[in-house]
Amino acid sequence: MLVIRQSFKGNNCERVCLVATAVVQCRSASRLLWRPHTAKHAHDCSLRLIRPSARKFTTGCRAALATEVQRPLEGSDQRPLHSRPEDQAETSTSAPTQGRLQLIVGPMFAGKTTRLIAEIHALVPGVRFAAVKSDKDVRYGTCSEFLPNTQRPNGSLHTHNGHSQVCYALPTLKHMRQLDDYEKLQAIFIDEGHFFEDLKEFCDCAVDHERKHVFVAGIDSDFQRNSIGQIADLFPRCDELHPLS
Ligand SMILES: Nc1ncnc2c1ncn2[C@@H]1O[C@H](COP(=O)(O)OP(=O)(O)O)[C@@H](O)[C@H]1O
Ligand SMILES: Cc1cn([C@H]2C[C@H](O)[C@@H](COP(=O)(O)O)O2)c(=O)[nH]c1=O
């Protein structure tokens, strides 16, 4: 087990902002963090990043580290996050006390949409949520235009092995705010996040100001191994990173 702690100075005070716990069998943990699917030994490792951000710094860092040290780390933990006792407090039907950003990244066919749908199924009953994907992704049929007057979901998340979940298919994430019950939403599940030009701005607002629990799934690089969309901008912002390969 490798525990990495990094501290750096914020504007006013020093914060320990990054705690990464990793089971690694290769030399470069940072390489694995950002490009798990291109790492030579990606299949031999599981890695979980916890970033207790400024939002919950005081207790978050110590609690996260304690939780992580107690958590069995062997293999890759594919349990949906909501089924983990330590995350239950975040998913009660009452309004969450703080926002949370969880990022699921990996190449195509890695299981990102499958994981996103599993997280939705694992929600505590009664939690108000919405799923959204980019309307640019028309591989499994075209989506009809979202009509704010009907408020009906106009698309679906599709996995490559045939599972689906009703969702909104939108050109930008700010369209989410046209939903009548947007303010009441506690959790938002975003698929194909790399296609949204307002991904970073939306997540900052939804998590930090509106205290929502946001999941984002997307590819972190294009076929030429260049960064794509704003997924990479979410790495330093996310509370949990789930790299798939
Ligand atoms: N070439 C393929 N054709 C069809 N299904 C595939 C293929 N490769 C993987 N799968 C299946 O698709 C699942 C992953 O699909 P999905 O969750 O949609 O991945 P992602 O969202 O990362 O592209 C895998 O668990 C596997 O069962
Ligand atoms: C690698 C790569 C992918 N895309 C597009 C193709 C698909 O619409 C999505 C990936 O979807 P998946 O759920 O991960 O299968 O991204 C692209 O536009 N450019 C690329 O280089």
Image (cartoon, rainbow, N blue to C red):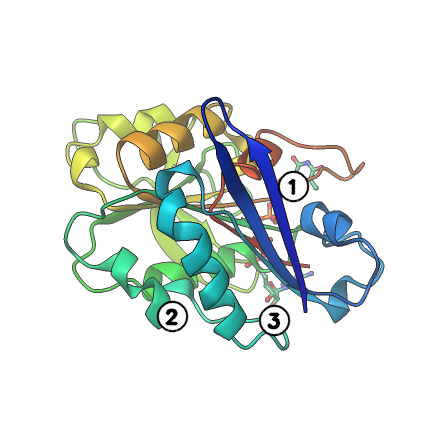
- One can see residue 137 in this view: no
The secondary element bearing badge 2 is classed as loop
Picture coordinates of residue 176 (x, y %)?
30, 31
The secondary element bearing badge 3 is classed as loop
Query: Label 2, on which residue?
Result: 84
Q: CA distance from mark 2 to mark 1?
A: 26 Å
Picture coordinates of residue 21 (x, y %)?
61, 60
Which is more foreground, mark 2 or mark 1?
A: 2
Badge 2, how many Cα within 10 Å: few under 14, some, many 20+?
few
| Figure quarter occupied by ligand 2 | top right
Quadrant into which the C terminus falls: bottom right
- The amino acid on which the numbered mark 1 sits, given as a three-letter code, is Asp
From the viewer's side, name the closer residue of 47 and 70.
70
Q: CA distance from mark 1 to mark 3?
A: 19 Å
Query: Label 3, on which residue?
Result: 76
Quadrant into which the N terminus falls: bottom right
N-term mark: 3 or 2 = 3
Are the residues tagged 1 and 3 within 8 Å (C-beta)? no
The residue that appears at 39% across and 61% down in the rendered structure is 119
Query: Label 1, on which residue?
Result: 220
- The amino acid on which the numbered mark 2 sits, given as a three-letter code, is Arg
